[in-house]
Image: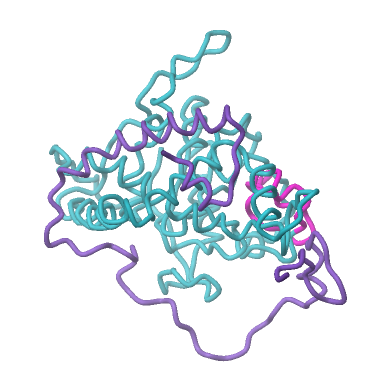
Chain colours: A cyan, B purple
Amino acid sequence: MVYLDDSILQAGKIASAGSKMLRNFAAPFDAEVVTRLNEPCERAVLGEFGLEPPKSLPDGVLLCNDVFGHVRTVVAERGLCSLRPTYGTVSRYGLIPTACSMDQIGVVCRTPAEGFSLLARIAGHDEKDGAMFPDARYSYEKPAQAPRLHREALPYADLVEPVFHILAYAEISGNLSRYDGVKFGYRAENYKTLEELYTKTRTEAFGFETKLAAVMGCLALSQDHYAALYDKALRARRLIRDSLRFDLYDVLVLPVESRLPVLAGLPSLTFRGVQLAAGVKNEGALLAAWEALS
Amino acid sequence: MTQPYEAMAKLDLPEDERRELKLRAELFLKMCSPLANADTEGAEPLVSVLDFNSVLREDTAGQMLAREALLTNAPEQYDGYFQVPKTLD
């Protein structure tokens, strides 16, 4: 059975992206990946807009957009496999957007072979997604030669995390602006003006992590911080992307997590502050539009 | 510190969330501090991660959603339009 993250549209079914804002939103059409799969799929509600860890994962193959790595963290703890394809190879038509320059539908599966098999069915150019490579189809096969290994320090390792968060928050903040209580989704009651309708609706319907992302995005894009944060992060993103030397090596091996897994029955060892740092070791892949497997 | 940005985001947080958000904002800015010393001189902003322009398609009419389908999810509608409170006095 294939499960779809609740941010992937299926005609006539509720697509809430895990948010109160969209709890009654019935999708008016099928996402391109749903059309290409052409088989019955179940839905799986994960964290709100991918900004919160999922409470659980379904028993089966899952298609999801895991920008913040929360799903991948749970996947690692359960010994499963998470496959994030190259940006621009799987259509995002019908995916509720999070951070557009990093959004990519990926696969959670039991083995890489299972994931690549599914990926071969859904990948390929779609004119309805404006940011895709032109190849119509992709085949995923084991390479004929062993991958080249090369040990070196990543030159911009300390910039990856801040650049990722600045750009992701800025893009999420922009994408959240469509949720205003007018055209679709939740609408607050007891408002007098249009401004009050916007503010009450968003305050009542968004969870805390979503509110945080919206505010941090406004901060990064504001006149006071634009040059030091957003513009500088865009420039650093180019340096990070260009520093990945896939002419020297085929695979970059990194730890999946920067903390120990949470053990059943024991309190979590994370604390405020680590929340930003934990579970985001493939940020570099997101920034450089590369694929990632864990 | 964060209230102007809260207003920009069209939010009006309760006090407990505002306090938590302020703490998280301080952590966010602290996490961003390595960027201040980074030498990005000469690097152009990476606006599009794909090195080709794929935005424009042929300017021909495609399939569009019907008005009824678009209005299905509207919180309030009137006579085929989205309905909102009065915007001008």
Q: Along the horizontal axis of the image, is A138 left or right of A36? A: left
Q: Residue furthest bottom?
A: B60
The C terminus of chain A - image quarter: top left
Q: Position of residue A42 (x, y in %)?
A: 73, 46
Q: Residue furthest front?
A: B89
Residue drawn at (67%, 41%) of the image: A45
Q: Position of residue B88 (x, y in %)?
A: 71, 71
State the extent of the magenta-drawn residues as a range. A1-26
Nearest the viewer among A277 and A219 is A219
Q: Is residue A55 magenta?
A: no
Q: Residue furthest right?
A: B79
Residue drawn at (73%, 76%) of the image: B65
Nearest the viewer among A114 and A293 is A293
Q: Along the horizontal axis of the image, is B65 left or right of B35? A: right
Q: Along the horizontal axis of the image, is A168 left or right of A224? A: right
Residue drawn at (65%, 48%) of the image: A202
Q: Is residue A133 above or below residue A228?
A: below
Q: Position of residue A206 (x, y in %)?
A: 63, 43
Q: Quadrant of residue A274?
A: top left
Q: Is residue A2 magenta?
A: yes
Residue drawn at (55%, 73%) of the image: A128
Q: Is most of the magenta stretch helix, strand or loop?
A: loop
Nearest the viewer among B28 and A139 is B28
Q: Is residue A155 above or below residue A167?
A: above
Q: How many marks?
A: 0
The N terminus of chain A - image quarter: top right
